[in-house]
Amino acid sequence: MKRMMNRALLALSLLISLISCKKDDGVTYIPPRDRGEEAPVSVGIIEEFLQTHFYNYEDFQNPPIGFDYKIKFDTIAGANADKTPLMEQVSSKIVPDRVDEGVTYKLYFLNAVEGGGDKPKFPDVTTLIYEGRYLNTEFPGSAYTKLFDSAATPVSFDLTAVVNGFQDGMIECRTSPFPAIEGSDGSFTFTDYGVGAVFIPSGLGYYVSPPNGSAIPFYAQLIFTYQLYASRQGDQDGDGIPTIFEDLNNNKLEEDDDTDEDGLPNYFDADDDNDGRPTSEEIISRQYILEAGDPEPTLLANEFEINRSYNEETQQTTINTVEYTDEDQDGIPDHLDEDS
């Protein structure tokens, strides 16, 4: 479930693979396939699966007693020949490859239950249960799924630290609008949450870097099914600026914003401009607590709301903001200005 690796490590891995195609001490080095050529092949494999398989949509339409709201797949054949194929029930969007600029994928996702809450943002931390499978296409004309990872009790995932396709799919689902209900046994129950699946081409999955010890083959297409319960705003480097606000080019990708060009993207860099002063010391964080009926606070010119929450018990709204200071008044915020 970890993101396959950062760009530097991936480049090193590819370099090692490309060093030689000869046998040396019994080892054969095979260069990875071209990502641009592999992209349509991987999407085609997924589309074939979607055309020939269905999910238990009838259970979702008329939930039986005790239904667990888990998505299950089966082949359209025999007694199931009249089932509606997944291809007619999924949505899709075009997403970029994170390694080769210009390579894109058609990513398919399924929202079996919409959910009543908000959609997570791309750098949020989500709480969910899930199952991860890969498509096994070892035998010609066949494609079946094999489970490689799962969580039956709620776990939390930082969406910047998982495979890109999972991140791209998760932001299309909705959370529960209600807080978790704790049972007498310490367990938690969620209601009105989103249930979905995402079908991930290899280039948005593990490609040639599957997790150590896993049985996932190279170039495997992945399928994740999930029940999405909650999400919270991510500030991966703890600098006081949520990662969503460190997406300076507004392309909804966290990896390609690196102000000081030190190889650490801003969302993972506690000193964005490399001036020796931590970003957290070059901004001003504020909090406003509003009682019922209070007017909205008037923010300064360079002050921005980063999040708010409402406490039903106290009927108070808490608003958190950050001010981008500019000591030398050159129009560049101090945390992005190396000579400030």
Image (cartoon, rainbow, N blue to C red):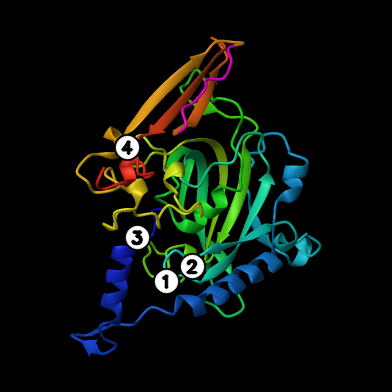
Residue 200 location (% of width, % of height): 54, 62
**What quarter of the picture does the C terminus occupy?**
top left
Can you tell which of label 1 and label 3 is closer to the viewer?
3
What amino acid is at disc 3?
A: Met
Mark 2 lies on a secondary structure that is helix
Pointer 1 residue = 218
Q: Are marks 1 and 3 in contact (CB under 8 Å)?
A: no
What amino acid is at disc 4?
A: Asp
310 or 56, nearer to the observer: 310
Q: Are marks 4 and 3 in contact (CB under 8 Å)?
A: no
225 above or below 27? above
3D distance between C-alphas at marks 1 and 3 = 15 Å
Upstream in sequence: badge 1 or badge 4: 1
17 above or below 71? below
Pointer 4 residue = 239
Q: Are marks 1 and 4 in contact (CB under 8 Å)?
A: no
Please say whether residue 68 is one of the residues in the magenta stretch.
Answer: no
Residue 164 location (% of width, % of height): 47, 57
Q: State which region is magenta.
A: 294-301
Q: Are marks 2 and 1 in contact (CB under 8 Å)?
A: yes
228 or 243, nearer to the observer: 243
Please identify the quarter of the rendering in which residue 137 is found: bottom right
Upstream in sequence: badge 2 or badge 1: 2
Q: Residue at x 60, y 26 (%)?
A: 178
3D distance between C-alphas at marks 4 and 3 = 23 Å
Pointer 3 residue = 5
Pointer 2 residue = 202
Left/right of residue 232 with respect to residue 285 in the rendered view: right
What amino acid is at disc 1?
A: Phe
3D distance between C-alphas at marks 2 and 3 = 14 Å
